[in-house]
Image (cartoon, rainbow, N blue to C red):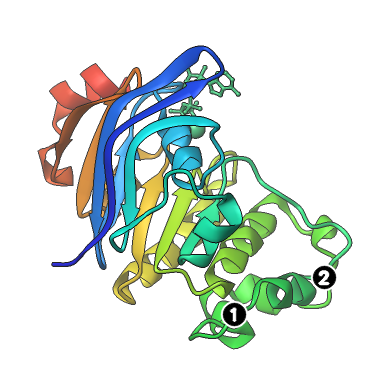
Amino acid sequence: MTLLLDVRNLHTWYGASQALFGVNLSINEGQVVSLMGRNGMGKSTVVKSIFGMMKTTKGSIKFQNQELLGQPSYKIARCGLGLVPEGRRAFGNLTVSENLHAASTNGPWNEKSIHHLFPRLGERTSQLSSTLSGGEQQMLVIARALMTNPYLLILDEATEGLAPTIRQEIWTAIGELKRQGISILVIDKTLKELIRISDHCVILERGANVWAGNPSDINENISKRYLGV
Ligand SMILES: Nc1ncnc2c1ncn2[C@@H]1O[C@H](COP(=O)(O)OP(=O)(O)OP(=O)(O)O)[C@@H](O)[C@H]1O
Ligand SMILES: [Mg+2]
């Protein structure tokens, strides 16, 4: 197994307020790892730290053996990390097709493979993205991240606030990405789907690791204690 991402002893601050207290997180090539924890426990802060969006950080974030900490976001994205950030982004004055082309790089992902993964986007190629439904916009955000042909896809709450049928379509697509061997870091509120798709789970509490293991080992005790379900 080849180590893809290795976050070691990560400390992060928002101004004077410390949010992460020595987080560890590693992902092997081809693995789907879920980062779990209740609201405000630091999941998105880990993601923002990986992408160089946090000003004050300490520790180490190695991606394919390269140190990312201290590098600007645009350079980090070029290393092969694809981000679907928390909260949807619309790209209003571009069509679906233009959005995809704007993100396109050399590699297996192109409009055709995107349409195969998300048939809804294939039906709306010339539609302005501002007129898409929330779920379709979310699919477009995922599709844009894939068009950069990332080695690691990071999904921060990709199904939040969406109708059940759309959520299901997105989970089906994530399952398909997993079958294709794409490495994924996933954050989500739906425990059932996370357990189904993950190879490994890491739980945070107040900005620190409190549990890690196989999804099948998340029993009622653990989920009540750390996940509040
Ligand atoms: N912009 C900010 N300024 C100051 N503190 C922040 C900011 N964003 C987050 N925090 C704090 O950092 C801590 C971790 O927040 P974070 O957003 O990483 O949590 P999360 O696990 O992603 O939560 P959620 O499940 O609600 O998305 C929280 O205590 C939060 O209040
Ligand atoms: Mg979050």
* Outermost residue, top side: 16
Specify the quadrant that holds the N terminus: bottom left
Q: Residue at (67%, 59%) from the top-left corner? A: 136
Q: Earlier in the sequence, mark 1 or mark 2?
A: 2
Separation of marks 1 and 2 at Cα, in angstroms: 18 Å
Labels 1 and 2 touching (C-beta < 8 A): no
Q: Which residue is mark 1?
A: 105
* Outermost residue, right side: 93
Query: What type is the residue that disc 1 sits on?
Result: Thr
Along the line of sight, which residue is nearer the eye, 201 or 229?
A: 201
Horizontal side, residue 103 vs residue 183: left or right: right
Whether residue 124 is visible to the viewer of this picture, yes or no, is: no
Secondary structure under badge 2? loop
Vertical arrangement, residue 87 with respect to residue 94, above or below:
above
Along the line of sight, which residue is nearer the eye, 61 or 27?
A: 61
Q: Position of residue 165 (x, y in %)?
A: 54, 54
Q: Position of residue 115 (x, y in %)?
A: 60, 80
Q: Residues within 10 Å of mark 2 (few under 14, many from 20)?
A: some
Q: Residue at (44%, 45%) from the top-left corner? A: 50
Q: Which residue is mark 2?
A: 95
Vertical arrangement, residue 104 with respect to residue 43, above or below:
below
Q: Residue at (53%, 70%) from the top-left corner? A: 146
Instruction: Name which quarter of the figure residue 137 lies in.
Output: bottom right
Specify the quadrant that holds the C terminus: top left
Q: Position of residue 129 (x, y in %)?
A: 80, 62
Horizontal side, residue 87 vs residue 50: left or right: right
Secondary structure under badge 1? loop
Query: What type is the residue that disc 2 sits on?
Result: Thr
